Amino acid sequence: MRKYPWLQFTLAIALSLLLLLLPLSAVRAAAPPVDVKINISHFPPFYVIESGIPHRGIGIDLIAAMNETQSKFRFSIIESSARRRHQMFKKGAYDVSLFDHIEWGWDRSQVEATRRYLTGGERYITLSGSEVHPDFFDDLSDKKIGAILGYHYRFSDYEADPAALSQKFDISLVTNQMQILKMVLSKRVQVGVMTESFLEYYFQSHQEMRSVLLISDHYDQPYNFVGIVRKNGPISAAQLEKILFSVFTDNRFDWIAGKYGITWEK
């Protein structure tokens, strides 16, 4: 080595550069994922939130898969009621809402949306009977209605304020779909407005109820589910969309759609 001092000098420089670069690489490798908060509220079968029971539903399984399929972002959940979710968003409590729609009270100047990834809708239900005519659901103004507090419905021109709804309709507002179903079955309301996805999930374990309930042929409103994302937040709509569709097209997660009987749009 003494015969080649230039080589010794070159190796010393290379070793110094390597030592300088190693900490930078370690920092990059150890960089924590970006935390992204997703709002959830009781909305079976998408989110089932019950006291004393671990959260479950399509959305819970999807969020777990979103964390599993990548490491740049870490998705966590923030609970709210359907009525309080917009207020919590304005306060910065969360950044993303899944299984949502831009028309459900969102300010387009504050949020952006992914492309559609799931379709469905809300249907009217009532007890089956000979007195129920085909046009029974055409006019709800003279019927007792069961619906969800904080939801936007087409029959009410998307009005969600309880006081305004009570002035226009004979309506009982509750906090979950099962309560609506129970009100219909007990004849406390004549018409329930329920998501098609909840009904299909319910019928999986209660096949006998298909003959008990009459379901409208048409939707109150069709669902075109998208992800709602805060503008200039920790994740963009394009980034969220890429992660969502990577889950939908990954056969490791086909069990999610199969479990709930849904079909993702890919």
Image: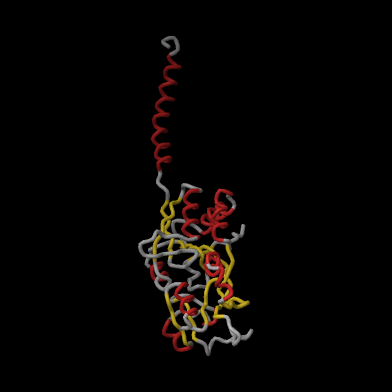
201 or 193: which is nearer to us?
A: 201
Residue 79: quadrant of the picture: bottom left
Q: x and y percent of residue 105 in the render?
A: 48, 73
Outermost residue on the top side: it is 3
Q: x and y percent of residue 178 in the render?
A: 46, 72
227 or 257: which is nearer to us?
A: 257
- Quarter of the image containing the N terminus? top left
Q: Is residue 118 at all visible to an observer of this figure?
A: yes
Q: x and y percent of residue 147 in the render?
A: 48, 78
- Quarter of the image containing the C terminus? bottom right
The residue at the point 63 percent across, 77 percent down is 217
107 or 128: which is nearer to us?
A: 128
Residue 9: quadrant of the picture: top left
Position of 136 compared to 163: left or right?
A: right
Position above or below: 158 against 96: below
Position above or below: 108 against 255: below
